[in-house]
């Protein structure tokens, strides 16, 4: 009976990232969809903005309108609105409604008036995003008005993600619609701004004047929209306890429930092939490493570990500053303690670039030519050696050099000579547009971390996405992650943090911080997480110096694992990932929906 009560209502989930890959919430709503569809079936629908003239390739329009969602869509069209009804071509194929915000631009004056009159939100001179947000919110409100007419008293749960979609909540309450609302903030807008500019954000959090701070960063209207959604929703949720504290002080309401983010592990798990996949993609990273470093000097690839960090370029929030300082200390300790390992650390982020550095590109191209030349020589030797073995009764191995033509000998020598250089390997793979202002580059230059031959820690700063079309790596990001040995994500401000979770799902040990939602979640709920390959850097109530030492200790201990120990750990990590599957975590969403149904 309880299940029937929970899954009987219509559930409509609205997010800016539905069929629109712009941020981490895209991963949340897309990966969660199969689990929700399994529970709610045809009672579930998603709403998102149509931001391009063409329908997204992952959206397939349907032309059957016999359910309540379809009837509301038809009613909207009869009122002159352009609205599309279809399915998201992803696992679970959830129903989706897409609405273009642009069609409401002519109603902007009326929208601004009711926001000011009813909610004291003054939308003055909005930028493009804010204008899209308020117009989309207005159109979604019209949809819910029509949907309520179609349902004839049936319960409707409306779940909104982030400030970009939460605007209808205030009007649903104001107009006393019988729609039960849930609002989830994945990161407060104001918190992100303040944290980037305050190194003592969490200490100062209780004393922040939200209005004064919002005005300082020129985001007052956006913050008021977020507060409206948080305060007027029937059930208010966020993704972690860490963000819950932030909501309490910046949005004026303590969350009713926490909704931790999960992953759809069917997408990631490759049973019995963890080590094979790691080796396959590590070999590809080896190719890059040889092309990037070996023209200047060499080191033992069998004794080399690949560490990486990735995410938005938020130098302080993402913990890039702490990572660099810990790497500097790691380099010094490894040299002092004569630890015979090489660490190649990749910073994968997105920054404005002019192009790939020509020297890096040329070195990679020459390496490819050397590889092709070796393949030709090998082919020639193989054929001649086989012929010699078949026709010669002498069992002695012939002189293999005699099997290589003078052309290929010359070509081989020419390739090697043209490849060798007299400069150290370049730290950044691209020519940055703001090279002098880039904080990662500044740190590396100040501390002389420039890939010197005796450095145990080498740095590769790649300010662009990893993709199969890139001539440097020639693989996609998930494959790159598989090929690495350790992910490093010691964030200062991270409401949840998908990057360490994506590592774990692929059998790659990861470091998070206890100031990230994910790290805090693991630290509070799982014993002996270090043994499972999930390391937590202590940043709460710790100085920057103490946290840097803590991170350095974790990395140096990992660097001294044997190959066998690393293989065992990879297997353990991937098997532990089930704890973060939507199969396990979707229950938190069900709890929130039960709470909203029980609320008067």
Image: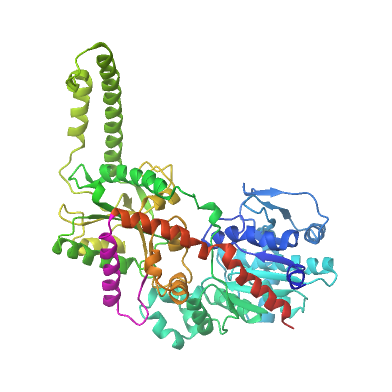
Is 463 inside the magenta-drawn segment? no
**Place of residue 417 in the rendered image (x, y in percent of width and height, measured from the top left):** 17, 33
Viewer-side residue, 527 vs 267: 527
Q: Residue at horizontal 26%, vertical 24%?
A: 377
In this view, 190 is above or below 318:
below
In this view, 495 is above or below 352:
below
Mark yes or no: residue 405 visible: no
**Place of residue 512 in the rendered image (x, y in percent of width and height, measured from the top left):** 39, 68
Q: Quadrant of residue 179?
A: bottom right
Residue range (magenta): 536-562
Image position of 270 (left or right of 120): left
Mark yes or no: residue 210 visible: yes
Look at the image and name its color scheme. rainbow
**Place of residue 90 in the rendered image (x, y in percent of width and height, measured from the top left):** 62, 51
Q: Residue at horizontal 32%, vertical 57%?
A: 565
Image position of 169 (left or right of 350): right
> The C terminus appears in which quarter of the rendering?
bottom right
């Amino acid at each position: 009976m309880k299940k029937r009560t929970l899954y009987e209502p219509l559930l409509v989930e609205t997010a800016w990232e539905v069929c629109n890959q712009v941020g981490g919430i895209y991963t949340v709503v897309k990966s969660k969809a199969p689990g929700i569809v399994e529970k709610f079936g045809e009672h579930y629908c998603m709403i998102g903005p149509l931001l391009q003239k063409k329908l997204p390739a992952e959206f397939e329009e349907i032309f059957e309108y016999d359910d309540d969602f379809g009837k509301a869509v038809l009613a909207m069209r009869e009122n002159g609105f352009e609205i599309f009804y279809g399915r998201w071509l992803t696992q679970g194929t959830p129903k989706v409604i897409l609405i273009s915000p642009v069609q409401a631009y002519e109603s902007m004056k009326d929208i601004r008036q009711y926001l000011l009159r009813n909610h004291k939100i003054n939308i003055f001179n909005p930028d493009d995003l804010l204008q899209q947000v308020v117009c989309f919110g207005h159109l979604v409100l019209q949809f819910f008005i029509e949907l309520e007419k179609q349902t004839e008293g049936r319960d409707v749960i409306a779940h909104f993600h982030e400030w970009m979609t939460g605007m209808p909540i205030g009007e649903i309450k104001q107009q006393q619609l019988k729609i039960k609302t849930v609002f989830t903030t994945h990161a407060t807008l104001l918190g992100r701004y303040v944290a980037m500019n305050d190194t003592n954000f969490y200490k100062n959090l209780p004393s922040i004047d939200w209005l004064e701070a919002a005005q300082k960063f020129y985001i007052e209207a956006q913050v008021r929209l977020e507060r409206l959604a948080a305060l007027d929703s029937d059930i208010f949720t966020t993704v972690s306890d860490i963000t819950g504290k932030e909501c309490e002080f910046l949005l004026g309401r303590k969350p009713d429930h926490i909704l931790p983010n999960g992953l759809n592990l069917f997408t990631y798990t490759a049973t019995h092939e963890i080590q094979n996949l790691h080796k396959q993609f590590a070999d590809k990273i080896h190719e890059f490493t040889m092309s990037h470093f070996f023209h200047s000097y060499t080191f033992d690839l069998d004794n080399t570990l690949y560490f990486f960090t990735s995410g938005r370029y938020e130098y302080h929030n993402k913990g890039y500053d702490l990572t660099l300082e810990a790497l500097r200390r790691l380099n010094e300790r490894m040299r002092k303690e004569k630890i015979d390992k090489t660490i190649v650390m990749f910073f994968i982020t997105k920054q404005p670039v002019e192009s790939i550095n020509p020297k890096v590109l040329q070195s990679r191209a020459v390496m490819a030519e050397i590889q092709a030349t070796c393949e030709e020589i090998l082919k020639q030797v193989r054929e001649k050696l086989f012929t010699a073995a078949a026709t010669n009764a002498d069992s002695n191995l012939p002189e293999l050099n005699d099997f290589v033509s003078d052309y290929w000998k010359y070509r081989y020598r020419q390739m090697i000579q043209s490849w060798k250089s007299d400069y150290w390997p370049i730290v950044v793979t691209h020519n940055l547009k703001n090279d002098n202002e880039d904080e990662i580059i500044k740190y590396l230059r100040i501390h002389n971390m420039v890939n010197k031959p005796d450095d145990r820690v080498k740095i590769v700063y790649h300010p662009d996405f990893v993709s199969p079309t890139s001539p440097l790596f020639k693989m996609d990001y998930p494959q790159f992650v598989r090929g690495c040995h350790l992910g490093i994500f010691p964030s200062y401000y991270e409401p949840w943090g998908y990057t360490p979770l994506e590592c774990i799902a692929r059998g790659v040990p990861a470091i998070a911080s206890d100031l990230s939602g994910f790290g805090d979640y693991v630290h509070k709920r799982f014993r002996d997480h270090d043994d499972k390959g999930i390391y937590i850097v202590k940043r709460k109530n710790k100085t920057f110096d103490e946290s840097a030492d803590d991170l350095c200790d974790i990395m140096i201990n990992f660097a001294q694992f044997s190959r066998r120990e690393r293989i065992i750990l990879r297997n353990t990590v991937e098997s532990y990932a089930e704890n973060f599957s939507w199969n396990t975590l979707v229950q938190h969403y069900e709890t929130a929906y039960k709470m909203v149904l029980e609320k008067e």
